[in-house]
Image (cartoon, rainbow, N blue to C red):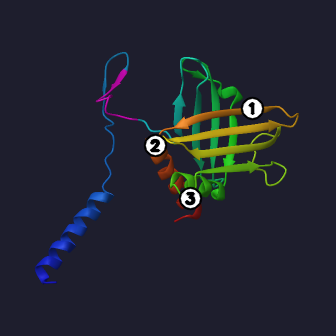
Amino acid sequence: MNEINQMKITNAASQLTATKTTSIQPPTATKTNAVNPIPAKSAAVQNFEKKFKVYKPNKTGNGAALQFDFNEDKKSVFVEMAKQTAPQSFDWANKLSFKMAVTDISKLLLVLEAKVKNIELFHDPSKGGYAVSAETRNSTVSFMKMDRGFYFKLSTQAQGGQVASVAIPLSDDEAIILRILLEKAVEKIYGW
């Protein structure tokens, strides 16, 4: 390879690196009037929270909501699910929760990367403390690839034997975001 081509490749690589490391910050300037501050370009500013949320309400009222929340201190991803109670409301007071350690996360990634069709995670709180609530006897997550998208179900069994479950479909585009976030969670857990 001649020197001119080598210089072009080196220059292109350094420009690519510079482009990747540059971050664009949302506008923070505000216009103010006597009553309320008005964010400048409010339509362009997005406030992304730490949780990945999927809300699927429906007209029959049996929709569901799903949230994934990475907790860096506990080196875990917490899954919370709630049933729909009204057209745009969910019963977060009676949510179901599941704490996923890195091995659980890797099993979800197997499905998301099409290495297996489905997985089941089973947690018994008396063996490791994975269940969030003391009233929970055991918890199960079922995750599978469907013809279109994915299917996620969380079930818990109370000490008294009552079973509660919530299920939700995930579209392929939602699953891509979930895969990326779960991979980032594994990287952060290991400090890489």
**Camera-side residue: 40 or 164?**
164
- To which quarter of the image does residue 68 belong? top right
Query: Dots 2 and 1: beta carbons under 8 Å?
Result: no
Name the front one of labels 3 and 2: 2
Name the amino acid type tagged 3: Val
Relative image position of residue 31 (x, y in whole percent): 29, 26
Give the residue pinned by disc 1. 164
**Segment colored magenta:** 37-46
Q: Most extreme residue toward the left, as rendered?
A: 4
Relative image position of residue 56 (x, y in whole percent): 53, 28
Relative image position of residue 13 (x, y in whole percent): 24, 68
Name the amino acid type tagged 2: Asp
Which element is circle 1 on?
A: strand
**Camera-side residue: 60 or 7?**
60
Q: Most extreme residue toward the right, as rendered?
A: 160
The residue at the point 50 percent across, 47 percent down is 178
Give the residue pinned by disc 3. 186
For the question of whether residue 26 can be seen, the reply is: yes
Name the amino acid type tagged 1: Ala
**Camera-side residue: 132 or 38?**
132
